[in-house]
């Protein structure tokens, strides 16, 4: 069975507000899917319904084919869930909390000891192992949260902002960990960090006001950026006129704009028609016309531009 996580027309209302509005998507084994959207878009609410912590108003969620509403116990056995914010039971130590979670998950004796040792090393919890969780720094709290989420080696992980508040080193560690465990799991992570999406996600789902506004690979989403495949080249100011003239006549070029650069240089932005890749043609024209290009590069498009456009318009 390939689809491990399925959201099927999930809907949640809080009074007059429809926080999650008819949201459907699937996550397959081996996929890491980023769940993006502005504050209040409905990410946490969706994740809580998938995890079975919040009743749905309509639709259903399935984990490994098991309906979360109908068979919560069985569904949750397949799930590791990291809620938004700090883990509960702040007065417990990581040792105490993870022992408790292991018991709930049915791990006893040597198997339990062994798993706790693994997690302690894996998430580098040695220094805080016997300290109350509420006294730990944000980063350690997140790591304890991650430890409890992956403790039973679940097939599905739903992680609500797993790297929120972590320093760059810890962010890197968490991403590495996700990549290590990703191949045989289905992982859904919400995040506000777009570079994280490019770093770890195979796919990104963007939500705004409770609705999905985009679902695709990071590359496909970037391709929707306004400057996708724009070729930027730098020329000496005195060659600007001639360069503009030449480049405007290249096939599939929609327009060429100029912007002031530094040191008497100019930046020319060659905008293709319909996002076409005009770099080879531009390079050819530079050679043929012997244009004094100092630097030539093709822009991929920025995910944050796409994010802003999609979530504003929604
Ligand atoms: N228990 C609740 N009662 C009333 N309204 C709620 C409740 N939980 C969430 N909401 C509202 O539902 C909407 C979606 O909230 P949600 O927490 O799912 O957003 P989010 O995408 O996770 O945002 P963030 O990026 O800030 O974490 C918001 O308008 C929020 O105020
Ligand atoms: Mg949230």
Image (cartoon, rainbow, N blue to C red):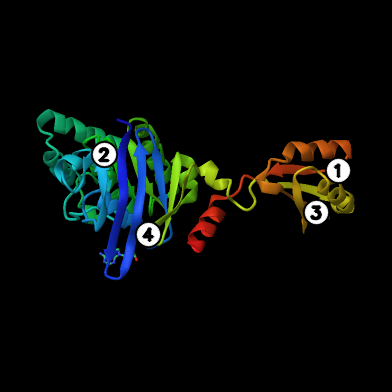
> Hey, which residue is sitting farthest left in the picture?
109
Near mark 2 (Cα within 10 A), the count class, few <14, some 14-19 or many ≥20, is some
Q: Which of pointers 3 and 4 lies earlier in the amino acid sequence?
A: 4
Do residues under tags 4 and 2 come within 8 Å of each other at their CB atoms?
A: no
Do residues under tags 4 and 1 come within 8 Å of each other at their CB atoms?
A: no
Tell which tag, 3 or 4, sits nearer the viewer. Answer: 4
> Hey, which residue is sitting farthest bottom in the picture?
16
**Real-space CA distance between mark 1 and mark 2, rounded to the nearest whole angstrom:** 57 Å
Q: Give percent across and percent down for residue 42.
A: 35, 58
Label 4 beta carbon less than 8 Å to ligand 1: yes
Q: Which of pointers 1 and 2 lies earlier in the amino acid sequence?
A: 2
Q: Does the rendering let one see residue 86?
A: yes
Q: Which of pointers 4 and 1 lies earlier in the amino acid sequence?
A: 4
Q: Does the rendering let one see residue 136?
A: no
Q: Which of pointers 2 and 3 lies earlier in the amino acid sequence?
A: 2
Question: Mark 2 — residue?
Answer: 150
Near mark 4 (Cα within 10 A), the count class, few <14, some 14-19 or many ≥20, is many
Question: Mark 4 — residue?
Answer: 210
Question: Mark 3 — residue?
Answer: 266
């Amino acid at each position: 069975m390939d689809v491990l996580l399925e959201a099927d027309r999930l809907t949640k209302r809080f009074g007059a507000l429809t926080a999650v509005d008819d949201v459907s998507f699937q996550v397959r084994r081996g996929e890491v899917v980023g769940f993006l959207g502005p504050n209040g878009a409905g990410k946490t609410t969706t994740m809580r319904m998938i995890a079975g912590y919040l009743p749905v108003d309509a639709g259903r969620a399935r984990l490994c084919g098991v309906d979360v509403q109908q068979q919560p116990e069985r569904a949750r056995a397949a799930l590791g869930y990291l809620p938004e914010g700090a883990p509960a039971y702040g007065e417990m130590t990581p040792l105490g909390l993870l022992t408790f979670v292991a018991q709930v998950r049915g791990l006893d004796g040597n198997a339990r000891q062994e798993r706790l040792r693994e997690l302690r090393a894996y998430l580098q919890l040695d220094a805080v192992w016997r300290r109350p969780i509420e006294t730990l720094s944000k980063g350690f709290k997140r790591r304890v949260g991650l430890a409890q989420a992956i403790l039973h080696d679940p097939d599905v992980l739903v992680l609500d902002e797993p790297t929120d508040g972590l320093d760059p080193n810890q962010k890197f560690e968490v991403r590495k960990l996700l990549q290590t465990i990703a191949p045989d799991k289905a992982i859904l992570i919400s995040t506000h960090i777009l570079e994280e999406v490019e770093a770890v996600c195979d796919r990104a789902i963007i939500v705004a006001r409770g609705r999905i506004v985009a679902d695709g690979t990071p590359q496909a989403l970037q391709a929707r950026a306004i400057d996708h495949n724009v070729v930027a080249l730098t020329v000496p100011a005195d060659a600007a006129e001639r360069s503009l003239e030449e480049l405007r006549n290249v096939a599939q070029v929609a327009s060429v704009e100029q912007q002031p650069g530094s040191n008497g240089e100019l930046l020319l932005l060659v905008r293709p028609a319909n996002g076409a890749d005009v770099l080879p043609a531009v390079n050819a024209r530079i050679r043929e016309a012997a244009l004094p290009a100092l630097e030539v590069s093709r822009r991929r498009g920025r995910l944050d531009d796409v994010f802003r456009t999609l979530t504003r318009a929604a």
